[in-house]
Image: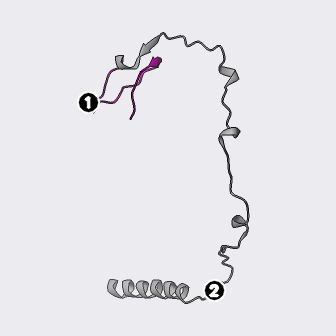
């Protein structure tokens, strides 16, 4: 009984997949093509001259915690930093 049910289910699923493979149209299903509206609009663009380089609401801000070196933080076994609230600085070199 279970075998027959599984076989019937597979046959129905296969028929549904084959229906879509041969260009048959399903009533009420609309699939947008490359000429549809979203592709006619211009893409969103931006540049550095559009960027805001200031945060006026942060002018004159002084953190309540003293400036500390990031190297003073505890480290994880794999070398990462265990972050804690505070105000940190670190000098690095990049190549």
Q: Is residue 6 left or right of residue 39?
A: left
Furthest residue in direction left, as rendered: 77
Q: Which mark is residue 65?
A: none
Q: Which residues are magenta?
A: 73-95
The stretch drawn in magenta includes residue 84: yes
The residue lying furthest to the front in this view is 95
Q: Position of residue 25 (x, y in %)?
A: 63, 86
In percent of width and height, residue 61 lies at: 62, 15
Q: Secondary structure at mark 2?
A: loop
- Residue closest to the eye, 3 or 18: 18
Q: Secondary structure at mark 1?
A: loop
Tally the numbered discs: 2
Label 1 environment density (alpha carbons within 10 Å; few <14, some 14–19, many ≥20): few
Dividing the picture into quadrants, the one containing residue 80 is top left
The quarter of the picture where residue 38 lies is bottom right
Label of residue 77 in the image: 1
- Between marks 1 and 2 in the image, the one whose residue lies nearer the viewer: 1
Specify whether residue 79 is painted magenta.
yes
Please tell me which of labels 1 and 2 falls first in the chain: 2
Question: Which residue is identified by label 2?
Answer: 25
Residue 13 place in picture, x, y as percent: 46, 83
Report the predominant secondary structure element of the magenta stretch.
loop
The residue positioned 59% from the left and 12% from the top of the image is 62
Query: Could you say which is closer to the camera, residue 88 or residue 20?
Result: 88
Q: Residue at 55% of width from left, 90% of height from top? A: 22
């Amino acid at each position: 009984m279970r075998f027959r049910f599984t076989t019937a289910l597979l046959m129905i699923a296969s028929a549904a997949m084959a229906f879509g493979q041969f260009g048959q149209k399903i009533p009420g299903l609309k699939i947008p093509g490359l000429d549809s509206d979203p592709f006619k609009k211009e893409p969103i663009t931006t540049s550095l001259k559009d960027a805001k380089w200031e945060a006026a609401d942060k002018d004159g801000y002084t953190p309540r915690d003293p400036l500390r070196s990031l190297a003073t933080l505890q480290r994880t076994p794999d070398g990462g930093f265990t972050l804690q609230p505070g105000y940190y600085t670190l000098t690095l070199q990049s190549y």
